[in-house]
Image: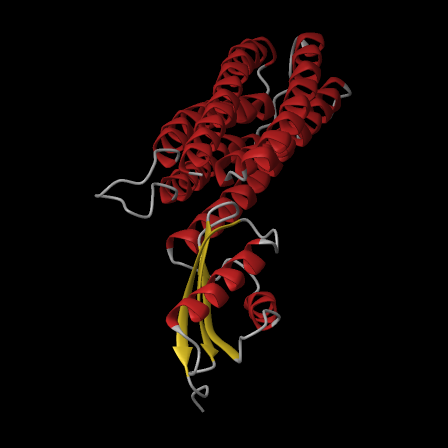
Amino acid sequence: MTGQRAAGSADRRRVMLTAVGVTIGLHLALLGAQAIATVATGSVAIAANALHIGVDTAVHIVALGGVWLATHPADPRHPYGYERYEALASLLIGMLLLVAVAIIIASAAPRLSEPRPSTATGIGLAIMAASAAATGALALYLRRRASQTSSRVLRSESIHAAADALISVGVLGAIGGSALGLPRVDPIVALGVAGIVAWRGWLVVRGAADVLTDAAAVDTDAIQVAALSVPGVDDCHSVRSRGEAGHVRVDLHIHVDPMLTVVEAHQIAVAVEERIRQLDLGIAEVLVHVGAGQPAA
């Protein structure tokens, strides 16, 4: 069993690191292409998106470090493992996204009163269409990998990539509007990009904060029902959970007949643990405290 868990952890680590590496490579390519489009068109919307991608690239490097640390096995210094480094990486991701929002707003707001038409719109349209297609494909790829590994970081990245695809579509509209003689559409879309990025940043920060502050991770009622369904369990209470999908830790108290032997009580506790694991809630560890006698009032 220990060997199987180690192999599973190694596979998870490989898949996660590969996914983040693919994301970094694609974002570097998109950053270069959109930098060219910004210079060619003078579009503040493309510039905002390029800045966003630049921040994302730095963020992905942070995520790569978080994934590398999070998939390390437990050791004496970290007996519960390194999973929370994923949440810490997600927290840094959210904070960097919020910084990008401030920069985008500062760049786009002045263009509302002094709009400038974009140039070389054909180049901008082609590059942004390719960006939308590439980020949409990346979102699907990361979503599959997040499901495979139960990774908060990859789940966050899949949401980011899906939003990036929508942002690219919006920037396409801004370039088209400028070509049709509506230059204010460009800064308006840039501010819309800022709003989307701000919302994404908030969701990432909130999710990471839940993990780092030990917010309840699963439905405690489901845990209690599962425990009480095991023959020999007279009562179940003080159910607690923490962690994130794939790494949830649960502890609970059960009461059994005081006339049972230690071995019999232990067998019931093992049965409770197995029943809870069968709930398919991403639970990595179950700690069952056994008490004898009537439940406390």
Is 269 on the left-hand or right-hand side of 130? left
Q: Is residue 98 above or below residue 259?
A: above
- Residue 182, position as x, y percentages in the image: 73, 26
Q: Is residue 252 above or below residue 160?
A: below
- Quarter of the image for the C terminus: give it: bottom left
Q: Nearer the viewer, residue 193 or 228?
A: 228
Residue 6: quarter of image: top left
Is 169 on the left-hand or right-hand side of 21? right
- Can residue 183 be seen by looking at this rendering? no
Q: Nearer the viewer, residue 213 or 9?
A: 9
- Can residue 54 be seen by looking at this rendering? yes
Residue 95: quarter of image: top left
Residue that sits furthest to the right in the current view: 180
Q: Is residue 180 above or below residue 191?
A: above
- Residue 148, position as x, y percentages in the image: 59, 34
- Quarter of the image for the N terminus: give it: top left
The colour scheme used to paint the residues is secondary structure
- Residue 217, position as x, y percentages in the image: 50, 58
The number of discs equals 0
* Residue shown at the point (46%, 61%) measured from the top left: 241
* Residue shown at the point (57%, 29%) measured from the top left: 114
Residue 120: quarter of image: top right
Q: Nearer the viewer, residue 48 or 9?
A: 9
Residue that sits furthest to the left in the current view: 77
